């Protein structure tokens, strides 16, 4: 019994270790949608333009993406395959890992599985959480990934984001706190509120959130390219099983008819 308990504790240990990692940072929640072709197409375009130069997505082939996201092959070649690559090839780049290590302090990881590894909420929040920090080599830091090596490559569309101080509603376990005397909501001083300098980005905050969503949605697709297929297959299998249940029910009736 004791042995079993020890084994059980050992099996559970990694679960707690994962749960402990960075759990104090608030992540904005999104629902990825593998059926939203337009979002996925926009996400792929953003990925090719802003990310692929540093991050390969080497388990994703252009051709498969063209089929799944319903992008005609000629448009894919014209707008989304920038290098001398062919449509049947994987989404790789010419980034040299050693040089990247020297430039950024860490090589940019392949992102095909980023959403499986980090979660969609994390990637979405990360892309929107860069802020000016002049102590960092590229002048930016990130709320969900402190001391990150990546520059804010989306700054031209997002604008320059800074941390400022201000009064925010006081929260207790996700609920607003009210003053017991006046009944008014209480506020508290915070110095990590993110604000974008007006007019510094080409997109409005809402448009930028949409762009970050589309990018994350695309990376969720590359993490599980078979998701849509398995969902529709799942429905077919259930219909088949229901049909067979009916067949076997009548067969059962038939077998027992003369005995009863
Ligand atoms: C100039 C090169 C460069 C570009 C362009 C770039 N990144 Fe990065 N990115 C990096 C580096 C370097 C790291 C590793 C940072 C570290 O470990 O400190 C990184 C890390 C990341 C991570 C965290 C990976 C992990 O799990 O540790 C994600 C997610 C990410 N980038 C997404 C993107 C997306 C999406 C884009 C396009 C909008 C993009 N990056 C564009 C250099 C780049």
Image (spheres, grey):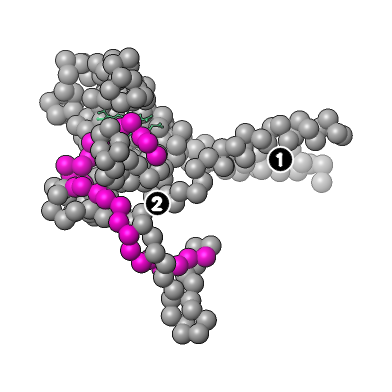
The residue closer to the viewer here, 55 or 147, is 147
Q: Are marks 1 and 2 in contact (CB under 8 Å)?
A: no
Q: Quarter of the image holding residue 215?
A: top left
Instruction: Write down the region rendered in magenta.
Output: 146-172
Please tell me which residue is depicted at 71% across the width and 43% down the height of the picture: 253
Front disc: 1 or 2: 2
Seen at 41% across and 36% down, the residue is 115
Distance between mark 1 and mark 2 Cα atoms = 54 Å
**Percent position (x, y) of residue 72?**
18, 30
Ligand 1 has an atom within 8 Å of the beta carbon of the residue at disc 2: no
**First in sequence: mark 1 vs mark 2:** 2
Residue 51: percent from the left, percent from the top? 25, 30
Where is residue 18 shown, x and y percent of the image?
A: 56, 37
Q: Which mark is residue 28?
A: 2
Checking the image for residue 252, the label placed there is: 1
Of 133 and 171, the residue lying toward us: 133
Label 2: how many Cα within 10 Å (few below 14, some 14–19, many 20+): few
Of the pair 196 and 165, the residue shown nearer to us: 165
């Amino acid at each position: 019994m004791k042995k079993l308990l020890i084994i059980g504790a050992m099996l559970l240990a990694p679960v707690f270790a994962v749960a402990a990692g960075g759990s104090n940072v608030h992540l904005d929640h999104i629902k990825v949608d593998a059926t939203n072709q337009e979002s996925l197409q926009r996400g792929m375009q953003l990925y090719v333009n802003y990310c692929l130069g540093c991050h390969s997505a080497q388990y994703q082939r252009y051709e498969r993406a063209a089929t799944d996201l319903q992008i005609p092959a000629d448009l894919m070649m014209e707008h989304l395959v920038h290098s001398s690559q062919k449509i049947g090839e994987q989404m790789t780049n010419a980034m040299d890992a050693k040089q990247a290590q020297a430039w950024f302090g860490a090589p940019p990881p392949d992102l095909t599985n980023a959403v499986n590894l980090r979660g969609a909420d994390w990637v979405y929040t990360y892309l929107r959480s860069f802020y000016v920090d002049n102590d960092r080599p590229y002048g930016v830091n990130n709320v969900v990934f402190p001391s990150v090596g990546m520059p804010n490559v989306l700054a031209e569309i997002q604008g320059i984001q800074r941390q400022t101080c201000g009064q925010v509603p006081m929260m207790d376990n996700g609920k607003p706190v009210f003053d017991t005397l006046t009944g008014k909501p209480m506020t508290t001083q915070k110095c990590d509120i993110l604000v974008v300098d007006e007019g510094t980005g080409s997109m409005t905050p809402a448009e930028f959130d949409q762009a970050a969503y589309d990018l994350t949605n695309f990376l969720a697709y590359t993490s599980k390219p078979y998701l849509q297929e398995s969902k529709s297959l799942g429905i077919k299998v259930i219909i088949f099983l229901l049909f067979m249940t009916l067949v076997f029910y009548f067969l059962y009736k038939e077998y027992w008819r003369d005995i009863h």
